[in-house]
Amino acid sequence: MRSRQFIPFGRFIAIDISLSNGINWHDKPYVASKQAMKKDIHSKPAISEQATLSSHRRSAPVGYARGQETKLRIIHAALELFGARGYEQTSTRDIATRAGVNSPALQYYFEGKEGLYLACAEHMAERGRVLMAPAVEKVRTILAGKPDRDALINCVWMIIERAADAILLSREVDAWARFMAWEDLRQDKSRGEAQAIIDKCFRREVNILLRTLVGRITGRKPDDAETRIRTVTLMGQISVFFAMREKALEDIGWRELDEGRLKMLKTIIRSQTFGALKSAAKSND
């Protein structure tokens, strides 16, 4: 299979980094073959010093249905249909119709249905990277100094709040959640490849950054089981609205979020985050 360019982002980044030598969010893309990507899932992730969004598959010649704009329209249509029906039940003809292009365009830009499916994962990864980058960069700047415990706790909240805004305010995230739900149910040999792209490009880095913060707050190692549990449960306050938004809102007694409800939700999550971390820090003193 032809090598594919992957972009940096994911469900929650986990690239093993030292805080003094993290990812530069604004470099050039790195290239990895499908075989190499699979191998990387089971090995220690490495940070490329070159990483940014690049076009998936072929670059379009000028005049071919407006190139990048057409590719993006196809990806948006595919995300909606893969999310609504799953991979197996979605046809390239249906995607082409939804996107307003002819079927050969999918083959031209993405080399078929599987290539388009992975391009959807790459698109989600890049968009998530962009949404989280301001908080991640700010936290890394703070960590370059000598932050005290309160500053570290506030850094955790910066990341959680940014994730909350991305999940709760971005309309496109609803389609991502449905897409990922079907990804978990895939039974064919390609199962897990979309998640691997997201992990490698985005989710792992955020996870490791959070574990580093929690570890420093509690005095434990980032890879310690207790640190991992705390990190997962802290992010669970937000990820539940990604995985099962409608059910979560129903359990609260809401049908939708407005400005006042969002403010209330974030206030409570912030209070729980600060309370949990201060308690954990105190118990480990």
Image (cartoon, rainbow, N blue to C red):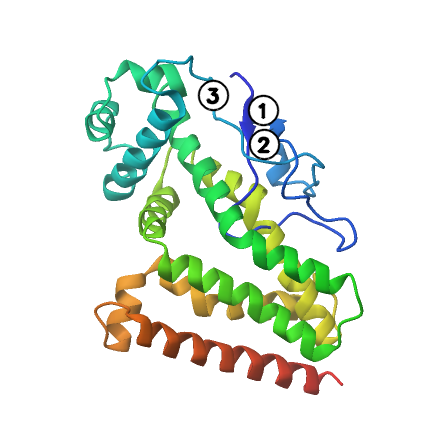
Real-space CA distance between mark 2 and mark 1, rounded to the nearest whole angstrom: 6 Å
Instruction: Please state the total of marks drawn on the protein image.
Output: 3
Q: Nearer the viewer, mark 2 or mark 3?
A: 3
Q: Is 270 situated above or below 167? A: below
Q: What element carries label 2?
A: helix
- Identified at 44% across, 66% down, the residue is 238
For the question of whether residue 60 can be seen, the reply is: yes
Direction from residue 220 to residue 41 in the image, left or right: left
Residue 134: x and y in percent read 57, 55
Real-space CA distance between mark 2 and mark 3, rounded to the nearest whole angstrom: 16 Å
Q: Which amino acid does label 2 sit on?
A: Met
- CB under 8 Å between discs 2 and 1: yes
Quadrant location, the C terminus: bottom right
Residue on which disc 3 sits:
57
- CB under 8 Å between discs 3 and 1: no
Q: Nearer the viewer, mark 3 or mark 1?
A: 3
In the picture, the disc for residue 108 is none
- Identified at 32% across, 76% down, the residue is 260
Residue 79: x and y in percent read 32, 38
Q: Which amino acid does label 1 sit on?
A: Ser
Residue 19: quadrant of the picture: bottom right
Q: Mark 2 vs mark 3: which is more N-terminal?
A: 2
Q: Report crowding for label 2: few under 14, some 14 to 19, many 20 or more residues within 10 A (C-alpha).
A: some
For the question of whether residue 189 can be seen, the reply is: no
Q: Nearer the viewer, residue 60 or 90?
A: 60
Q: Report crowding for label 1: few under 14, some 14 to 19, many 20 or more residues within 10 A (C-alpha).
A: some
Q: Is 228 situated above or below 95? A: below
